[in-house]
Image (spheres, rainbow, N blue to C red):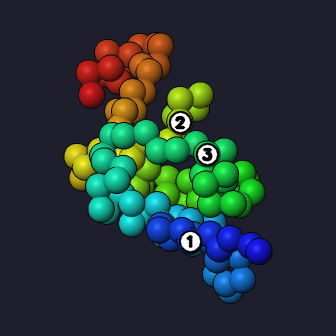
Amino acid sequence: MFAQVIHAEPMVDHGSAIAPYIQLAAILRARIADGTYAPGSRMPSAEGLAQEYEIAVNTARKALKLLTDEGIAVMSPGRGTYVRAADLGQRSRPWPPVVKPCAPGPSMLSACAR
């Protein structure tokens, strides 16, 4: 006799026409929206997501990359992926600010003064 496993949380449907990484990204967006992952909090690793949702690690990485491309999350190499803080999404200037070095030469003062 086989026991039936019932998942209380949404799972990736491997038989769906929708790519697994897109399904996972939708699940993660819902978790962010319902507060499971609060702004500024660290999200599970690709390896953790792969194990939890029974998908390949590269599929989980692709879902996290999609969220970063959408501006929902921020990847920090060696540290993990974090939910973007609410105020960062509303910035009108890039962060961190881009600092252009002054060019050496006679016009250096005018270039640096701008």
Q: Secondary structure at mark 1?
A: loop
Query: Distance of mark 2 from mark 1, alpha carbons?
Result: 30 Å
> Of discs 3 and 1, which sits in the foreground?
1
Using the image as rendered, state which of residue 101 and residue 56 is in the foreground: 56
Q: Are marks 2 and 1 in contact (CB under 8 Å)?
A: no
Locate residue 8, reporting x and y percent.
Answer: 47, 68
Q: Residue drawn at (32%, 20%), measured in percent from left and top?
A: 112
Using the image as rendered, state which of residue 48 and residue 19 is in the foreground: 48
Residue type pointed to by label 3: Gly
Above or below 23: residue 114: above
Locate residue 43, reporting x and y percent.
Answer: 47, 44
Q: Residues within 10 Å of mark 2 (few under 14, many from 20)?
A: few
Residue position marked by numbered label 3 in the rendering: 48
93 on left or right of 14: left
Residue type pointed to by label 1: Ile
Residue at the bottom extreme, as displayed: 17
Residue position marked by numbered label 2 in the rendering: 80
Residue type pointed to by label 2: Gly
Figure quadrant of the C terminus? top left
Sequence-first tag of 2 and 1: 1
Residue position marked by numbered label 1 in the rendering: 6
